[in-house]
Image (cartoon, grey):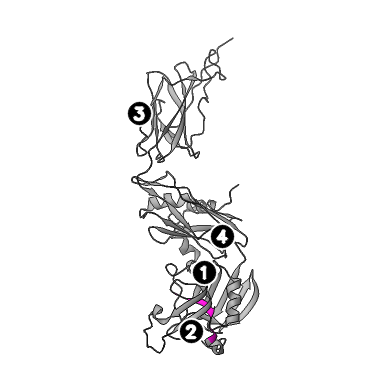
Protein backbone atom coordinates (compact mmCIF):
# COMPACT_ATOMS: atom_id res chain seq x y z
CA UNK A 1 0.00 0.00 0.00
CA UNK A 2 1.32 3.42 -0.86
CA UNK A 3 2.01 5.84 1.97
CA UNK A 4 -0.52 8.60 2.39
CA UNK A 5 0.91 11.87 1.03
CA UNK A 6 2.01 14.29 3.75
CA UNK A 7 -0.07 17.45 3.95
CA UNK A 8 1.01 20.43 6.03
CA UNK A 9 -1.34 23.05 7.43
CA UNK A 10 -1.37 26.47 5.84
CA UNK A 11 -1.50 29.06 8.61
CA UNK A 12 -2.61 32.66 8.61
CA UNK A 13 -0.03 34.97 10.17
CA UNK A 14 -2.59 36.62 12.41
CA UNK A 15 -4.92 34.50 14.53
CA UNK A 16 -7.79 36.81 15.33
CA UNK A 17 -10.01 34.01 16.64
CA UNK A 18 -8.34 31.01 18.25
CA UNK A 19 -10.81 28.15 18.32
CA UNK A 20 -8.86 24.95 17.60
CA UNK A 21 -8.24 22.93 20.74
CA UNK A 22 -4.93 21.36 21.62
CA UNK A 23 -4.22 18.14 19.87
CA UNK A 24 -6.36 18.96 16.85
CA UNK A 25 -4.41 18.96 13.61
CA UNK A 26 -5.16 19.33 9.93
CA UNK A 27 -2.05 17.35 9.01
CA UNK A 28 -2.25 13.89 7.48
CA UNK A 29 1.12 12.40 8.30
CA UNK A 30 2.92 9.45 6.76
CA UNK A 31 1.53 5.99 6.90
CA UNK A 32 3.14 5.62 10.33
CA UNK A 33 1.23 8.67 11.70
CA UNK A 34 -2.42 8.56 10.52
CA UNK A 35 -4.80 11.45 11.10
CA UNK A 36 -6.36 9.64 14.05
CA UNK A 37 -3.05 9.22 15.91
CA UNK A 38 -3.10 10.42 19.50
CA UNK A 39 -0.95 13.57 19.91
CA UNK A 40 2.28 12.98 21.77
CA UNK A 41 3.33 15.13 24.76
CA UNK A 42 5.22 18.11 23.32
CA UNK A 43 6.25 19.54 26.71
CA UNK A 44 9.97 19.14 25.95
CA UNK A 45 9.65 20.87 22.58
CA UNK A 46 7.70 23.99 23.59
CA UNK A 47 8.82 26.89 25.77
CA UNK A 48 6.95 29.95 27.01
CA UNK A 49 7.91 33.02 29.01
CA UNK A 50 6.70 32.15 32.51
CA UNK A 51 7.10 34.50 35.50
CA UNK A 52 9.76 33.81 38.10
CA UNK A 53 8.95 30.94 40.45
CA UNK A 54 6.27 31.91 42.97
CA UNK A 55 5.37 35.01 40.98
CA UNK A 56 2.44 35.86 38.76
CA UNK A 57 2.81 37.05 35.18
CA UNK A 58 2.88 40.76 34.44
CA UNK A 59 -0.29 41.47 32.40
CA UNK A 60 1.55 44.33 30.72
CA UNK A 61 3.86 41.82 28.95
CA UNK A 62 2.71 39.60 26.07
CA UNK A 63 2.60 35.82 26.25
CA UNK A 64 5.22 34.19 23.99
CA UNK A 65 5.42 30.51 23.00
CA UNK A 66 8.37 29.16 20.98
CA UNK A 67 9.72 25.90 19.56
CA UNK A 68 12.91 24.85 21.39
CA UNK A 69 14.76 22.81 18.77
CA UNK A 70 15.49 23.19 15.10
CA UNK A 71 12.67 20.93 13.94
CA UNK A 72 8.92 20.94 14.34
CA UNK A 73 6.46 23.77 14.40
CA UNK A 74 3.47 25.22 16.23
CA UNK A 75 0.21 24.65 14.40
CA UNK A 76 -2.20 26.46 16.69
CA UNK A 77 -2.59 28.07 20.11
CA UNK A 78 -5.75 28.49 22.16
CA UNK A 79 -5.47 30.68 25.26
CA UNK A 80 -8.58 31.16 27.42
CA UNK A 81 -9.16 32.88 30.74
CA UNK A 82 -11.62 31.57 33.33
CA UNK A 83 -14.43 33.59 31.76
CA UNK A 84 -13.91 31.90 28.43
CA UNK A 85 -12.38 34.93 26.72
CA UNK A 86 -9.88 34.13 23.96
CA UNK A 87 -6.46 35.77 23.98
CA UNK A 88 -5.72 36.77 20.38
CA UNK A 89 -2.25 36.14 19.03
CA UNK A 90 0.00 35.95 15.97
CA UNK A 91 1.96 32.95 14.69
CA UNK A 92 5.04 33.47 12.56
CA UNK A 93 4.94 32.09 9.02
CA UNK A 94 7.47 29.38 9.88
CA UNK A 95 5.43 28.28 12.90
CA UNK A 96 8.35 28.80 15.29
CA UNK A 97 6.86 31.47 17.56
CA UNK A 98 3.43 32.58 18.76
CA UNK A 99 2.93 35.92 20.51
CA UNK A 100 -0.23 37.41 22.03
CA UNK A 101 -1.48 40.55 20.29
CA UNK A 102 -4.20 41.47 22.78
CA UNK A 103 -3.68 42.64 26.33
CA UNK A 104 -3.79 39.99 29.03
CA UNK A 105 -6.39 40.41 31.75
CA UNK A 106 -5.14 41.32 35.23
CA UNK A 107 -5.80 38.93 38.10
CA UNK A 108 -6.80 36.16 35.70
CA UNK A 109 -5.97 32.48 35.29
CA UNK A 110 -5.24 31.31 31.73
CA UNK A 111 -5.29 27.84 30.25
CA UNK A 112 -3.15 27.54 27.12
CA UNK A 113 -3.36 24.64 24.67
CA UNK A 114 -0.64 24.32 22.01
CA UNK A 115 -0.96 22.06 18.97
CA UNK A 116 2.32 21.11 17.27
CA UNK A 117 3.78 18.73 14.70
CA UNK A 118 7.28 17.27 14.53
CA UNK A 119 9.57 17.02 11.50
CA UNK A 120 7.70 13.90 10.37
CA UNK A 121 4.29 15.53 10.66
CA UNK A 122 3.27 13.69 13.85
CA UNK A 123 0.83 15.73 15.97
CA UNK A 124 1.87 16.88 19.42
CA UNK A 125 0.16 18.84 22.18
CA UNK A 126 0.97 20.69 25.36
CA UNK A 127 -1.34 22.31 27.92
CA UNK A 128 -0.23 24.70 30.66
CA UNK A 129 -1.76 27.29 32.96
CA UNK A 130 -0.54 30.52 34.47
CA UNK A 131 -1.93 33.44 36.46
CA UNK A 132 -1.51 37.17 35.97
CA UNK A 133 -0.92 39.65 38.77
CA UNK A 134 -3.88 41.70 39.99
CA UNK A 135 -4.18 45.34 38.95
CA UNK A 136 -2.70 48.01 41.18
CA UNK A 137 -5.47 50.39 40.05
CA UNK A 138 -8.94 48.95 39.45
CA UNK A 139 -11.67 50.77 37.55
CA UNK A 140 -15.17 49.81 38.71
CA UNK A 141 -18.67 50.99 37.83
CA UNK A 142 -21.51 51.56 40.30
CA UNK A 143 -24.88 51.30 38.57
CA UNK A 144 -28.06 53.14 39.43
CA UNK A 145 -30.81 53.37 40.39
CA UNK A 146 -31.27 50.71 43.06
CA UNK A 147 -32.85 47.45 41.98
CA UNK A 148 -36.64 47.63 41.79
CA UNK A 149 -39.56 48.64 39.59
CA UNK A 150 -39.45 51.98 37.77
CA UNK A 151 -41.34 54.04 35.23
CA UNK A 152 -40.67 53.98 31.49
CA UNK A 153 -38.48 57.09 31.62
CA UNK A 154 -35.88 55.85 34.11
CA UNK A 155 -32.29 56.23 32.79
CA UNK A 156 -29.53 53.86 33.88
CA UNK A 157 -26.50 55.52 35.45
CA UNK A 158 -22.91 54.30 35.77
CA UNK A 159 -20.52 56.03 38.17
CA UNK A 160 -16.88 55.13 37.52
CA UNK A 161 -14.40 54.90 40.36
CA UNK A 162 -11.72 56.71 38.33
CA UNK A 163 -11.93 59.32 35.55
CA UNK A 164 -11.58 58.12 31.95
CA UNK A 165 -10.71 60.83 29.42
CA UNK A 166 -9.05 59.05 26.51
CA UNK A 167 -11.47 58.22 23.67
CA UNK A 168 -10.04 54.76 23.06
CA UNK A 169 -10.24 53.94 26.77
CA UNK A 170 -13.84 55.18 26.89
CA UNK A 171 -14.73 52.86 24.04
CA UNK A 172 -13.22 49.91 25.94
CA UNK A 173 -15.22 50.82 29.06
CA UNK A 174 -18.45 51.35 27.17
CA UNK A 175 -18.21 48.00 25.39
CA UNK A 176 -17.88 46.34 28.78
CA UNK A 177 -20.98 48.02 30.25
CA UNK A 178 -23.73 45.72 29.02
CA UNK A 179 -27.41 46.68 29.11
CA UNK A 180 -29.88 44.00 28.07
CA UNK A 181 -33.62 44.47 27.82
CA UNK A 182 -36.38 41.91 27.34
CA UNK A 183 -38.10 42.79 25.07
CA UNK A 184 -35.09 44.21 23.22
CA UNK A 185 -34.77 47.92 22.47
CA UNK A 186 -32.29 50.23 20.79
CA UNK A 187 -30.33 52.38 23.21
CA UNK A 188 -26.98 53.97 23.98
CA UNK A 189 -24.71 55.24 26.73
CA UNK A 190 -23.91 58.96 26.97
CA UNK A 191 -20.74 60.23 28.67
CA UNK A 192 -21.96 63.00 30.99
CA UNK A 193 -18.40 63.61 32.18
CA UNK A 194 -15.17 61.67 32.75
CA UNK A 195 -16.71 59.51 35.50
CA UNK A 196 -20.44 59.37 34.81
CA UNK A 197 -22.49 57.77 32.04
CA UNK A 198 -26.24 57.65 31.44
CA UNK A 199 -28.03 55.02 29.38
CA UNK A 200 -31.47 55.37 27.81
CA UNK A 201 -33.35 53.71 24.97
CA UNK A 202 -34.26 55.57 21.79
CA UNK A 203 -37.86 55.59 23.01
CA UNK A 204 -39.23 55.04 26.52
CA UNK A 205 -38.73 51.56 27.98
CA UNK A 206 -41.49 49.10 27.06
CA UNK A 207 -44.04 48.43 29.78
CA UNK A 208 -43.15 45.21 31.57
CA UNK A 209 -39.56 45.16 30.33
CA UNK A 210 -36.85 43.45 32.38
CA UNK A 211 -33.55 45.31 32.23
CA UNK A 212 -30.21 43.89 33.37
CA UNK A 213 -26.95 45.83 33.61
CA UNK A 214 -23.52 44.23 33.99
CA UNK A 215 -20.03 45.68 34.05
CA UNK A 216 -17.71 43.16 32.42
CA UNK A 217 -14.63 45.15 33.39
CA UNK A 218 -12.88 42.66 35.68
CA UNK A 219 -9.27 42.24 34.56
CA UNK A 220 -9.85 44.19 31.34
CA UNK A 221 -7.03 46.52 30.32
CA UNK A 222 -8.49 50.01 29.95
CA UNK A 223 -5.38 52.17 29.69
CA UNK A 224 -1.78 52.49 30.79
CA UNK A 225 -1.50 50.25 33.87
CA UNK A 226 -5.25 50.68 34.42
CA UNK A 227 -7.44 47.59 34.56
CA UNK A 228 -11.06 46.99 35.34
CA UNK A 229 -12.38 45.57 38.59
CA UNK A 230 -15.56 43.84 39.70
CA UNK A 231 -18.87 45.73 39.40
CA UNK A 232 -22.14 44.70 41.03
CA UNK A 233 -24.83 43.91 38.42
CA UNK A 234 -28.26 45.57 38.43
CA UNK A 235 -31.73 44.34 37.51
CA UNK A 236 -34.78 46.56 36.98
CA UNK A 237 -38.37 45.94 35.95
CA UNK A 238 -40.45 48.54 34.16
CA UNK A 239 -44.01 49.29 35.25
CA UNK A 240 -46.95 50.94 33.49
CA UNK A 241 -46.34 53.91 31.23
CA UNK A 242 -47.42 56.88 33.37
CA UNK A 243 -47.16 60.29 31.72
CA UNK A 244 -48.32 63.53 33.31
CA UNK A 245 -48.48 66.67 31.14
CA UNK A 246 -48.84 69.99 32.98
CA UNK A 247 -49.98 72.79 30.66
CA UNK A 248 -48.94 76.14 32.12
CA UNK A 249 -51.27 77.93 29.71
CA UNK A 250 -54.47 75.96 30.37
CA UNK A 251 -53.56 75.40 34.06
CA UNK A 252 -54.45 71.70 33.90
CA UNK A 253 -52.47 68.49 34.21
CA UNK A 254 -53.49 65.44 32.18
CA UNK A 255 -52.37 62.06 33.48
CA UNK A 256 -52.28 58.99 31.23
CA UNK A 257 -51.64 55.36 32.01
CA UNK A 258 -50.56 53.28 29.01
CA UNK A 259 -51.98 55.93 26.71
CA UNK A 260 -55.39 56.24 28.41
CA UNK A 261 -56.38 59.41 30.31
CA UNK A 262 -56.96 58.51 33.96
CA UNK A 263 -57.21 62.01 35.49
CA UNK A 264 -57.35 65.71 34.61
CA UNK A 265 -56.27 67.96 37.47
CA UNK A 266 -56.48 71.76 37.86
CA UNK A 267 -53.01 73.08 38.73
CA UNK A 268 -50.99 76.22 39.18
CA UNK A 269 -47.41 76.53 37.94
CA UNK A 270 -44.67 79.14 38.38
CA UNK A 271 -45.61 82.80 38.26
CA UNK A 272 -43.58 85.38 36.27
CA UNK A 273 -40.04 85.46 37.57
CA UNK A 274 -40.39 81.91 38.89
CA UNK A 275 -41.73 80.16 35.79
CA UNK A 276 -41.67 76.35 35.85
CA UNK A 277 -39.09 74.69 33.61
CA UNK A 278 -40.44 73.36 30.33
CA UNK A 279 -39.66 69.89 29.05
CA UNK A 280 -39.60 66.28 30.14
CA UNK A 281 -38.67 65.45 33.72
CA UNK A 282 -38.45 62.08 35.42
CA UNK A 283 -39.87 61.43 38.88
CA UNK A 284 -36.89 61.20 41.25
CA UNK A 285 -38.70 60.25 44.44
CA UNK A 286 -41.64 60.92 46.74
CA UNK A 287 -41.69 62.64 50.14
CA UNK A 288 -44.82 62.73 52.26
CA UNK A 289 -43.65 65.87 54.06
CA UNK A 290 -41.19 68.56 53.01
CA UNK A 291 -40.50 71.91 54.66
CA UNK A 292 -40.09 74.42 51.82
CA UNK A 293 -38.27 77.72 52.33
CA UNK A 294 -37.81 80.57 49.90
CA UNK A 295 -34.17 80.87 50.95
CA UNK A 296 -33.49 77.50 49.29
CA UNK A 297 -34.10 79.07 45.86
CA UNK A 298 -32.42 82.41 46.58
CA UNK A 299 -35.32 84.42 48.02
CA UNK A 300 -34.11 86.52 50.93
CA UNK A 301 -35.99 86.55 54.22
CA UNK A 302 -38.28 89.54 54.53
CA UNK A 303 -38.93 89.67 50.78
CA UNK A 304 -42.53 89.81 49.61
CA UNK A 305 -41.87 86.45 47.91
CA UNK A 306 -40.42 84.85 51.02
CA UNK A 307 -42.10 81.68 52.32
CA UNK A 308 -41.63 78.90 54.86
CA UNK A 309 -44.31 76.23 54.50
CA UNK A 310 -45.04 72.60 55.41
CA UNK A 311 -45.78 70.74 52.16
CA UNK A 312 -47.40 67.32 51.84
CA UNK A 313 -47.57 64.68 49.12
CA UNK A 314 -44.47 66.04 47.41
CA UNK A 315 -43.28 64.26 44.25
CA UNK A 316 -39.79 65.46 43.35
CA UNK A 317 -38.78 66.09 39.71
CA UNK A 318 -35.55 68.14 40.11
CA UNK A 319 -32.75 68.10 42.66
CA UNK A 320 -33.02 71.88 43.04
CA UNK A 321 -36.47 71.55 44.59
CA UNK A 322 -39.13 71.40 41.91
CA UNK A 323 -42.04 69.21 42.98
CA UNK A 324 -45.59 68.27 42.15
CA UNK A 325 -47.25 68.79 45.54
CA UNK A 326 -50.26 69.75 47.61
CA UNK A 327 -50.83 73.53 47.71
CA UNK A 328 -54.08 74.10 49.64
CA UNK A 329 -53.28 77.83 49.94
CA UNK A 330 -53.64 78.30 46.16
CA UNK A 331 -56.76 76.22 45.44
CA UNK A 332 -58.60 79.33 44.21
CA UNK A 333 -55.93 79.90 41.54
CA UNK A 334 -55.61 76.29 40.41
CA UNK A 335 -57.01 75.89 36.93
CA UNK A 336 -57.04 79.70 36.59
CA UNK A 337 -53.60 81.29 36.94
CA UNK A 338 -49.96 80.62 37.79
CA UNK A 339 -48.99 81.73 41.30
CA UNK A 340 -46.34 79.26 42.53
CA UNK A 341 -42.60 79.71 42.88
CA UNK A 342 -41.90 77.05 40.24
CA UNK A 343 -43.60 73.90 41.49
CA UNK A 344 -46.77 72.36 40.12
CA UNK A 345 -49.35 72.88 42.85
CA UNK A 346 -52.74 71.20 43.28
CA UNK A 347 -55.30 70.44 45.96
CA UNK A 348 -54.37 68.10 48.79
CA UNK A 349 -56.74 65.42 47.49
CA UNK A 350 -55.36 65.59 43.97
CA UNK A 351 -51.78 65.64 45.25
CA UNK A 352 -52.44 62.55 47.37
CA UNK A 353 -53.90 60.77 44.32
CA UNK A 354 -50.90 61.74 42.19
CA UNK A 355 -48.49 60.68 44.95
CA UNK A 356 -50.10 57.25 45.17
CA UNK A 357 -50.23 56.66 41.41
CA UNK A 358 -46.70 57.53 40.30
CA UNK A 359 -43.32 55.98 40.98
CA UNK A 360 -39.69 56.97 40.28
CA UNK A 361 -39.02 56.83 36.56
CA UNK A 362 -42.48 58.09 35.56
CA UNK A 363 -42.72 61.07 33.23
CA UNK A 364 -43.79 64.63 34.13
CA UNK A 365 -43.76 67.02 31.18
CA UNK A 366 -44.37 70.77 31.40
CA UNK A 367 -45.51 72.65 28.31
CA UNK A 368 -46.35 76.27 27.45
CA UNK A 369 -44.44 77.75 30.39
CA UNK A 370 -42.41 80.94 30.17
CA UNK A 371 -39.58 79.11 31.93
CA UNK A 372 -36.35 77.76 30.50
CA UNK A 373 -35.93 74.19 29.28
CA UNK A 374 -35.11 71.50 31.79
CA UNK A 375 -31.35 70.85 31.99
CA UNK A 376 -30.30 67.59 30.35
CA UNK A 377 -28.02 66.64 33.26
CA UNK A 378 -27.20 67.87 36.74
CA UNK A 379 -30.64 68.75 38.06
CA UNK A 380 -32.43 65.44 37.80
CA UNK A 381 -33.04 63.43 34.66
CA UNK A 382 -33.61 65.67 31.65
CA UNK A 383 -32.16 63.00 29.38
CA UNK A 384 -35.29 62.78 27.21
CA UNK A 385 -35.03 66.42 26.16
CA UNK A 386 -32.04 65.52 23.96
CA UNK A 387 -33.09 64.15 20.58
CA UNK A 388 -31.79 60.72 19.62
CA UNK A 389 -29.17 61.85 17.10
CA UNK A 390 -27.59 64.19 19.65
CA UNK A 391 -27.81 61.54 22.36
CA UNK A 392 -25.92 59.02 20.23
CA UNK A 393 -23.09 61.52 19.74
CA UNK A 394 -22.42 61.28 23.48
CA UNK A 395 -21.34 57.65 23.06
CA UNK A 396 -17.72 56.66 22.55
CA UNK A 397 -18.93 53.90 20.21
CA UNK A 398 -21.52 55.58 18.02
CA UNK A 399 -20.40 59.20 17.94
CA UNK A 400 -19.95 58.88 14.17
CA UNK A 401 -23.43 58.26 12.78
CA UNK A 402 -21.86 57.32 9.41
CA UNK A 403 -20.24 54.25 10.98
CA UNK A 404 -22.70 51.35 10.49
CA UNK A 405 -20.51 48.90 12.39
CA UNK A 406 -20.64 51.04 15.52
CA UNK A 407 -24.39 51.40 15.19
CA UNK A 408 -24.83 47.63 14.98
CA UNK A 409 -22.56 47.24 18.00
CA UNK A 410 -24.86 49.47 20.04
CA UNK A 411 -27.95 47.56 18.94
CA UNK A 412 -26.36 44.21 19.70
CA UNK A 413 -25.68 45.23 23.29
CA UNK A 414 -29.41 45.46 23.91
CA UNK A 415 -30.51 42.14 22.52
CA UNK A 416 -31.80 39.83 25.25
CA UNK A 417 -29.60 37.00 26.46
CA UNK A 418 -30.57 33.52 25.30
| Quadrant where the N terminus is found in the figure | top right
Q: Where in the figure is residue 5, as x and y percent of width and height?
A: 53, 16
Which of the two residues, 125 or 195, is positioned nearer the viewer here? 195
Q: Mark number for residue 340?
A: 2
Q: Where in the figure is residue 4, as x and y percent of width and height?
A: 55, 15
Q: Where in the figure is residue 413, as x and y percent of width and height?
A: 52, 51
Quarter of image, res 69: top left
Q: Which residues are magenta?
A: 321-328
Label 4 belongs to which residue? Answer: 148
Q: Are marks 2 and 1 in contact (CB under 8 Å)?
A: no
Q: Where in the figure is residue 309, as x and y percent of width and height?
A: 47, 82
Magenta-colored stretch includes residue 81: no
Does label 2 or label 4 sit earlier along the sequence?
Answer: 4
Label 3 belongs to which residue? Answer: 53
Does label 3 or label 4 sit earlier along the sequence?
Answer: 3
Q: CA distance from mark 3 to mark 4?
A: 49 Å
Residue in the picture at 55% in, 70% down: 363
Q: CA distance from mark 4 to mark 1?
A: 13 Å
Label 1 belongs to which residue? Answer: 285
Amino acid sequence: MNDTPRIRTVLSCTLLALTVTAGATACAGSGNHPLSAKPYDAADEIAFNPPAEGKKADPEKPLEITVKGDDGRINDVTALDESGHHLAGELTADGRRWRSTAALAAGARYTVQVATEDEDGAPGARTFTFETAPAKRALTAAFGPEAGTYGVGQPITAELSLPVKDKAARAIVERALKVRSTPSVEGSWYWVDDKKLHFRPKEYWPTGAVVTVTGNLAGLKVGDKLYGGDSKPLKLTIGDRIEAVADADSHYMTVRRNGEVINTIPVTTGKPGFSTRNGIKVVLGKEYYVRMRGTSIGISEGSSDSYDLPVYYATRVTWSGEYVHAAPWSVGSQGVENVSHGCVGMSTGNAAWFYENVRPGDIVRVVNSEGEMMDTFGNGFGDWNLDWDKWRKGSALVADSSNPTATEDAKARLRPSL
